[in-house]
């Protein structure tokens, strides 16, 4: 009887130790398989939606990953990042955002205005904080109450184009130009906002703005051809639909014998004449820094929107030669690129 009692005690003690060990190790990294939620000390689940696969937004994503890592949230280690691209489709962006929200991620991030809008709409009902990247006018997009006090459990970065410097550049490269064409997507709040500002600046530099709105990629070929026939040049903002179809716009402009001005260096490398370029990798890194603050416990709505507006002039020497233009004296030190093959 004594031997049985000792054996029973030993068995119970072993079982207790085993249970205690399992409890200590089963959920230490948030990988217990229980749900998508992470505890305060575990791996953070982050959903990122990029609106379209073009160079500007790719740069935002690259910078964002760098910024998150610098803030202590490295993918595969302290963060589990679910990155998906909506391929320029609003409906897909909304579907992806809804799926992410259903999994109760710790943070959702939208790159470009349409993706940010989809993320914001889906995350609100799930009480998930959101961060946006490269949204030119987050107030007009109804993402935040104001830039300094965003509210809405949301913050992010605004890519404010240096429109006056861009207009000065166009006047310098084409001193006799009278009409600038703007092709924009009517549903993109950032494009509508930029167009309004550009039209207000135009009289100061002797320009007339000829605008043409499109609703989808299918509208761009005809709209670009029609617009190019009426103007001396075309200026592109950060319109995601237009940038995603920049090759079509450039082809129609070339047929009409007019240059296109871009909004960042990748567009110039693809065949635009020149641009006052924003650094979208730096914009992404700043977004990652803000995201790190949110993941560390700061209320997203209390963090002011970071406004990136410093620009650097860049021009394409191949395009300059093609149109028989001379590099203006004021841009002799501008960054020179050639058309990417």
Image: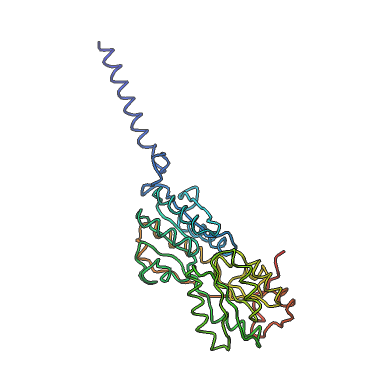
Which quadrant: the C terminus?
bottom right
Residue located 72% across and 82% down the image: 325
Q: Quadrant of residue 335?
A: bottom right
Please determine whether, in this image, residue 123 is positioned above or below residue 23. Answer: below
Q: Is residue 332 or residue 248 the one in the foreground?
A: 248
Residue located 55% across and 65% down the image: 240
Q: What percent of the width, then of the height, locates residue 96? A: 47, 52
Please determine whether, in this image, residue 30 is positioned above or below residue 136. Answer: above
Q: Total of numbered circles in the picture? A: 0
Residue located 43% across and 58% down the image: 119
Q: Is residue 305 or residue 135 the one in the foreground?
A: 135
Q: What percent of the width, then of the height, locates residue 72? A: 45, 55
Q: What percent of the width, then of the height, locates residue 270? A: 66, 67
Left or right of 297 on screen, residue 328: right
Q: Quadrant of residue 32?
A: top left
Q: What percent of the width, then of the height, locates residue 168? A: 58, 84
User: Colour scheme of this structure image?
Assistant: rainbow
Which quadrant: the N terminus?
top left
């Amino acid at each position: 009887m004594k031997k049985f009692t000792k054996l029973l005690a030993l068995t119970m003690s072993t079982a207790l130790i085993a249970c205690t060990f399992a409890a200590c190790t089963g959920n230490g990294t948030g990988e217990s398989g229980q749900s998508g939620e992470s505890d305060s000390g575990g791996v953070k689940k982050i959903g990122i939606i990029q609106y379209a696969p073009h160079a500007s937004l790719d740069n935002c994503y690259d910078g964002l990953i760098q910024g998150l890592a610098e803030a202590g949230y490295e993918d595969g280690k302290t963060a589990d990042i679910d990155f998906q691209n909506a391929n320029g489709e609003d409906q897909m962006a909304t579907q992806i955002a809804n799926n992410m929200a259903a999994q109760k991620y710790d943070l959702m991030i939208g790159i470009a205005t349409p993706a940010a809008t989809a993320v914001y709409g889906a995350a609100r009902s799930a009480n998930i904080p959101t961060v946006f990247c490269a949204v030119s006018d987050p107030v007009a997009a109804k993402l935040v109450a104001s830039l300094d006090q965003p509210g809405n459990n949301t913050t992010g970065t605004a890519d404010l184009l240096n429109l006056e410097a861009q207009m000065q550049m166009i006047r310098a490269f084409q001193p006799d130009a009278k009409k600038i064409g703007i092709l924009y997507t009517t549903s993109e709040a950032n494009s509508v906002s930029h167009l309004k500002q550009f039209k207000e600046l135009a009289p100061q530099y002797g320009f007339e703005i000829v605008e043409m709105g499109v609703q989808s990629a299918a509208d761009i070929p005809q709209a670009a051809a029609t617009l190019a026939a009426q103007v001396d040049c075309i200026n592109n903002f950060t319109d995601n639909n237009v940038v995603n179809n920049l090759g079509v716009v450039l082809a129609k402009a070339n047929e009409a014998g007019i240059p296109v001005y871009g909004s960042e260096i990748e567009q110039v490398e693809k065949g635009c004449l020149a641009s006052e370029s924003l650094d979208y990798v730096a914009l992404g890194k700043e977004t990652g820094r803000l995201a790190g603050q949110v993941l560390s416990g700061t209320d997203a709505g209390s963090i002011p929107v970071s406004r990136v507006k410093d620009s650097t002039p860049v021009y394409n020497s191949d395009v300059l030669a093609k149109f028989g233009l001379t590099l203006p004296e004021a841009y002799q030190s501008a960054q020179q690129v050639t058309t990417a093959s």
